[in-house]
Image (cartoon, rainbow, N blue to C red):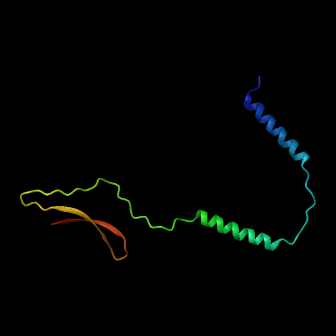
Amino acid sequence: MFSLRTTLSTGLIALTIAGTTIATASEANAHNRFWPGLATGVVGGAILGSALSQPRYYAPPAYYGPVYNPYVVVGGYPSCHIVWRQNGWGDQYRVRVCS
């Protein structure tokens, strides 16, 4: 009559309600715990920040395409090949050089 999903959902709801009625909150005790809390926040922030930061190495730009193989044609045609050049800002680009 009842499916497994309905039975599990009903059981979880009953456990949640029972757990909230059994669990009681104790009195709030205010302690001067500023410095340990600050130290925990700083250390945790440093660890999390270093884990989420970007890598510090430089990866050259990837070339997604066929490798250009220059070939020599006899009969007066120029021989061309591809070389990498840099502009004034250090960005690399490919140039076709023919001789």
Residue drawn at (32%, 67%), measured in percent from left and top?
93
Quadrant position of residue 78 = bottom left
Q: Is 72 rendered above or below residue 86?
A: above
Q: Is residue 12 toward the left or the right of residue 31 in the image?
A: left
Q: Is 7 rendered above or below residue 56?
A: above
- Residue 2, percent from left and from top: 76, 26
Observer-nearest of 32 and 4: 32
Farthest-out residue, right? 27
- What number of labels is visible? 0
Farthest-out residue, left? 75
Q: Is residue 99 toward the left or the right of residue 88 in the image?
A: left
Q: Is 26 rendered above or below residue 57?
A: above
Residue drawn at (76%, 34%), measured in percent from left and top?
8
Residue drawn at (47%, 67%), measured in percent from left and top?
57
Quadrant position of residue 98 = bottom left
Q: Is residue 77 toward the left or the right of residue 65 in the image?
A: left
The quadrant of the rendering that contains the N terminus is top right
Farthest-out residue, bottom? 88
- Residue 39, percent from left and from top: 75, 71
- Residue 47, percent from left and from top: 65, 66
The quadrant of the rendering that contains the C terminus is bottom left
Q: Is residue 80 toward the left or the right of residue 84 in the image?
A: left
Observer-nearest of 64 and 20: 64
